[in-house]
Amino acid sequence: MPTPIDSLLIIVPAYNEEAAVGGVVRAVRAAMPGTPVLVIDDCSTDATHVVAREAGARVLPLPHHLGLGGCVQAGYKLAFELGYRYVIRVDGDGQHDARDIPRVFEALRTSGCEMVIGSRFVGGNGSRPGAVRGLGIRFFRMVLRPILGKAVHDPTSGFVGVNRNALQVFSKSFPLEYPEIEALVVLQRRQFRFMEIACEMHPRTTGRSSITAMRSIYYIVHVLLGVFVNVLKFDQRGRRPATRSSVKPGKS
Amino acid sequence: MDRLLNVMTVFSGLLLLFVLVSVRRAHIRVEYSVSWLAAAAALLILSRSRGLLEGAAHKLGLSDPPFALLLVVGCVFLIMFYRFSAIISKLRDDNIALAQRLAILEYHLQTLRDGRTNG
């Protein structure tokens, strides 16, 4: 597979998203013509992989259900092996607006940041999560602020673009459950930079979120523990030279 | 006290027997049976040796020897649970890495097949 300097792969992790994934793939292909789209099918029990193929995506079929982190990491591993320089992740439930992908890609190419997050809160685009999730997001903003050294407005966003440096790190080490927040800390420990850009977020029209109200407490405890483990896991070998600026001001 | 020690003797004897049968039937691998067998044997010896148990209770500052036995049982099982958690975590990591590798290989295979069909 050719790997030009600006090669981009769009990955779509999906589990039982047959109702939404076809539309997501078509929207991504319309927004980014010619860019390969890879749906990572987390061993769905419905026709997700068939629908994704019919819509024009390549499919990476996992042999059994790994959960979101394992699913996304499989996509990162394949992208890294194939030599892609950039990967943008779009969720398979149709909540992310594919028309924002070109701006995320542009930011990835020009900002020098290792990660670009599509944020529903930067620029105030009107999209608001539910009460419990909103509280969780506010809580993690507070927790992450001193760890990351800068504010992150939407730490749970799954609309994320990474460059090859981050891809290399994530293909070796990626949180397996609820990966978004921990992934930020993993990058911070290596003095990588991130930025957020304003993106639209649509309400989910099909299926249900894996994080129910009951699971929110488990989510918070699990992610908090993961964050602190990553903070403590100071990998000297993985760090960049100290001469490089660790944090680039967020562009919003 | 005697009744509790007798119960522990029967329990540890059954545990020993159960683990041995499980190993024989290949339900448990030999390397993972060692800690169970050692724990069961330790319990059996402690529950049958009053002098040893009273010595242990004295060293631990406990007035009642059966408490020493329960404390030892608790500690042994906590250590074993920790050990098995570590083993399960490693197995899960290996399993995820294997599943991802398998999926990637299948992807490459499909790409080759598609190339042949189209070319």
Image: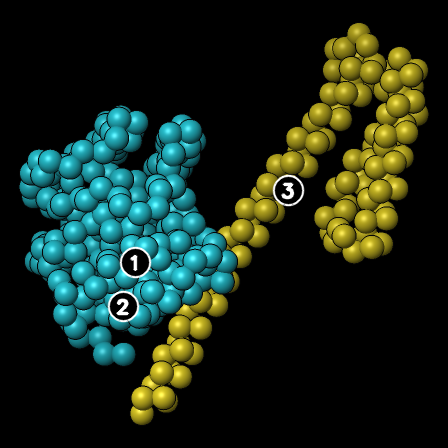
Subunit under mark 3: B
Circles 2 and 1: CB atoms closer than 8 Å: yes
Q: Amino acid at mark 1?
A: Val
Residue B118, horizontal then vertical, whole percent:
31, 88
The foreground one among B43 and A38 is A38
Q: Amino acid at mark 3?
A: Phe
User: On the image, numbered disc 3 is attached to which residue?
Assistant: B84
The foreground one among A214 and A191 is A214
Whether residue A95 can be seen here: yes
Q: Secondary structure at mark 1?
A: helix
**Left or right of A207 on screen, residue A122:** left
Quadrant showing the C terminus of chain A: top left
Q: Amino acid at mark 2?
A: Ala
Q: Quadrant of residue A2?
A: bottom left
**Left or right of A112 on screen, residue B50:** right
Subunit under mark 1: A
User: On the image, numbered disc 1 is attached to which residue?
Assistant: A21
| Residue at mark 3 shares a chain with residue at mark 1 | no
Q: Quadrant of residue B66?
A: top right
Q: Residues within 10 Å of mark 3 (few under 14, many from 20)?
A: few
| Residue at mark 2 shares a chain with residue at mark 1 | yes
Chain in yellow (letter): B
Chain A drawn colour: cyan
Q: Secondary structure at mark 3?
A: helix
Q: Residues within 10 Å of mark 2 (few under 14, many from 20)?
A: some
Q: State how far apart marks 2 and 1 are (Cα).
A: 8 Å
In the image, residue A144 sits, relative to residue B17, either above or below, namely above
Mark linked to residue A55 = 2
**Left or right of B28 on screen, residue A158:** left
Q: Residues within 10 Å of mark 1 (few under 14, many from 20)?
A: many
Quadrant showing the N terminus of chain A: bottom left
| Residue at mark 3 shares a chain with residue at mark 2 | no
